[in-house]
């Protein structure tokens, strides 16, 4: 055995400090030293203001007090995503967190609902989603605080300030022995095996390590510029290649969901925090100029701007190898998928989770690296397919962008998923996938893709009894939600944000 006794993380921001926090939680500083190198001269993109439910699990694993974290990061709660104008103009649907409905005598709820719907049932699939019903009513309550009620089946995530989150994870990591070194990396030295041996800083300092984690963002200083790892470009599936972002003061209530509104050449986001709102436009430069995108975004703002809009170019895809030799890429250095389903922070955490599963010694055995890369690539492909589903099923033909999306060539894996679903509502199940059945059902239904038939097994249930059961379940859910506090009331009572001057921060 040749255990690692020094891991160097190059780059800070959300990716670097989450990586440091995860490692410091799992690895004793007496066994392996962790050093993070970042430069104050290099700004961070601040990716990931909107999260998904696995992020709550990360806080629990790290032993972080959720209430304290919410206060520090100005966070609000997120029950899902509202998609407006994606299928057609003036139509919207909701992708909720948590389960929808409940099994009926061991039969899957979706199939039970589908049988009734194909026979003219009036209630929609989302009428049985506690997250959706709460979001519609602008209500919120922690699911684990209301056991034995329909709301207990909801899940939630957070909207948060990415820079404040990074500072929180930094404090967490440093308290557990992570060493921070400030400096600009000017050179990277490899040994005869092609492994990274050390990095050189602008001030002349040398930092040696046995394993290196590349958190340098789109620059990919270690994984690409040093080790020459290429990139799978998925622009042929996801044409958006730019984003423009701006922060504004809050106006009105703080809704417990993200808004994703389809525009002429892409889509805009609206992410409400407790003391400000994040806004952005993700678009394709083939169909839209930066000037037009900026004008579109600014025309939709309803609060005073807190910073100047900034354009962020990107290429959708993933590295050929996320881990090569003794270097692991995390965050934007490993790949990027547009933030439609808020998966950026999840992929950071997932990358670290897999790294701990296949944790190496100094030899970095190829079998570990191969399996890690296979699993991470599969995760990226699953998320890619789920994002493409939002675009390719559109019925819009009002702009060249949407006509392109409607007629795009699909990944074979997604084509097979859609074909399988159209038959009897069946879903292809992978190993440890992020998006579970209810997520696929919600987007399929929201985009107007409904199976031709339901599962014949459901005929074992009496249709009249089934309809009565579902009607009563929807009514019970509605009545329970009516008694809950509003999202703003819950925030004020349980986790009001710390006071911060956002104009000074911007």
Image (cartoon, rainbow, N blue to C red):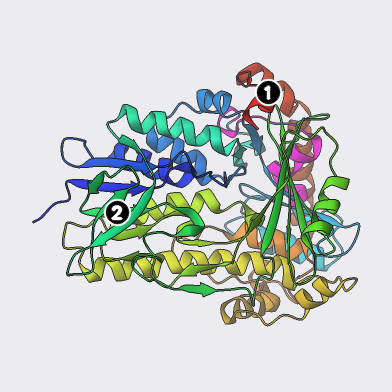
- Residue at 81 percent across and 57 percent down: it is 291
Residue 382 on image: x %, y %: 54, 67
Q: Nearer the viewer, residue 268 or 446?
A: 268
Q: State the image coordinates of residue 30 (x, y, percent, origin top left).
A: 16, 35
Residue 402 screen position, x and y as percent? 81, 71
Image quarter hosting the N terminus: bottom left
Q: Residue at x 62, y 72 (%)?
A: 426
Q: Is residue 262 visible?
A: no
Residue at the spot of label 2: 212
Judge left or right: residue 421 versus residue 55: right
**Residue furthest to the left:** 1
**Mark linked to residue 172:** none
Label 1 to label 2, Cα distance in Å? Answer: 42 Å
Q: Which residue is mark 1?
A: 490
Q: Are marks 1 and 2 in contact (CB under 8 Å)?
A: no
Kindly state the secondary structure of the residue where label 2 is placed.
strand
SS category of the residue bearing label 1: helix
Report the predominant secondary structure element of the magenta stretch: helix
Q: Position of residue 190 (x, y in %)?
A: 23, 63
Instruction: Point out the stretch of residues depicted in magenta.
Output: 126-146
The local crowd at label 1, few if under 14, some if 14 to 19, many if 20 or more residues have their Cα within 10 Å, is some
């Amino acid at each position: 055995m040749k255990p690692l006794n020094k891991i160097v993380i190059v780059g800070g921001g959300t990716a670097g400090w989450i990586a440091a926090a995860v490692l410091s939680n799992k690895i004793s500083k007496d066994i392996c030293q962790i050093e993070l190198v970042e430069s104050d001269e290099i700004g961070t993109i601040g990716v990931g203001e909107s999260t998904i439910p696995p992020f709550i699990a990360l806080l629990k694993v790290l032993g972080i007090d959720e209430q304290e974290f919410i206060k520090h990061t100005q966070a609000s709660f997120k029950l899902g995503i509202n998609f407006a104008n994606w299928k057609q103009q003036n139509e919207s649907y909701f992708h909720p967190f948590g389960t929808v409905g409940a099994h009926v005598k061991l039969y899957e709820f979706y199939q039970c609902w589908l049988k009734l719907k194909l026979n003219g049932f009036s209630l929609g699939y989302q009428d049985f989603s506690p997250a959706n019903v709460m979001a519609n009513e602008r209500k919120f309550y922690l699911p684990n605080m209301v056991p034995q009620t329909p709301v207990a089946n909801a899940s939630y995530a957070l909207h948060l300030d990415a820079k404040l989150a990074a500072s929180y994870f930094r404090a967490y990591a440093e308290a557990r022995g992570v060493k921070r070194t400030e400096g600009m990396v000017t050179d990277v030295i490899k040994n005869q095996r092609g492994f990274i041996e050390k990095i050189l800083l602008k001030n002349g300092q040398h930092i040696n390590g046995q394993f290196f984690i590349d958190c340098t963002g789109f620059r990919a200083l270690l994984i690409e510029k040093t080790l020459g790892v290429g990139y799978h470009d998925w622009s042929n599936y996801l044409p958006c290649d730019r984003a423009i972002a701006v922060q504004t003061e809050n106006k009105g209530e703080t809704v417990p969901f993200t808004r994703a509104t389809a525009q002429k050449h892409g889509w805009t986001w609206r992410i409400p925090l407790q003391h400000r709102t994040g806004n952005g436009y993700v678009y394709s430069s083939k169909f839209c100029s930066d000037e037009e995108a900026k004008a579109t975004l600014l025309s939709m703002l309803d609060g005073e701007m807190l910073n100047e809009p900034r354009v962020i170019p990107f290429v959708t895809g993933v590295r050929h190898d996320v881990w090569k030799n003794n270097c692991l890429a995390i965050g934007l250095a490993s790949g990027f998928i547009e933030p439609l389903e808020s998966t950026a922070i999840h992929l950071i955490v997932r990358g670290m989770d897999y790294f701990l599963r296949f944790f190496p010694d100094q030899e970095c055995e190829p079998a570990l690296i191969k399996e890690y890369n296979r699993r991470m690539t599969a995760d990226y492909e699953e998320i890619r397919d789920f994002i493409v589903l939002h675009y390719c099923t559109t019925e819009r033909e009002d702009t060249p962008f949407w006509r392109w999306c409607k007629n795009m060539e699909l990944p074979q894996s997604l084509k097979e998923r859609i074909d399988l679903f159209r038959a009897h509502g069946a879903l292809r199940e992978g190993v440890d996938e992020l998006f579970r059945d209810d997520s696929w059902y919600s987007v399929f239904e929201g985009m107007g893709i409904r199976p031709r038939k339901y599962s014949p097994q459901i005929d074992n249930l009496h249709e009249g009894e089934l309809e009565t059961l579902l009607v009563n379940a929807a009514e019970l859910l509605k009545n329970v939600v009516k008694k809950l506090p509003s999202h703003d009331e819950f925030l004020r009572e349980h986790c009001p944000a710390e006071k911060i001057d956002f104009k000074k921060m911007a």
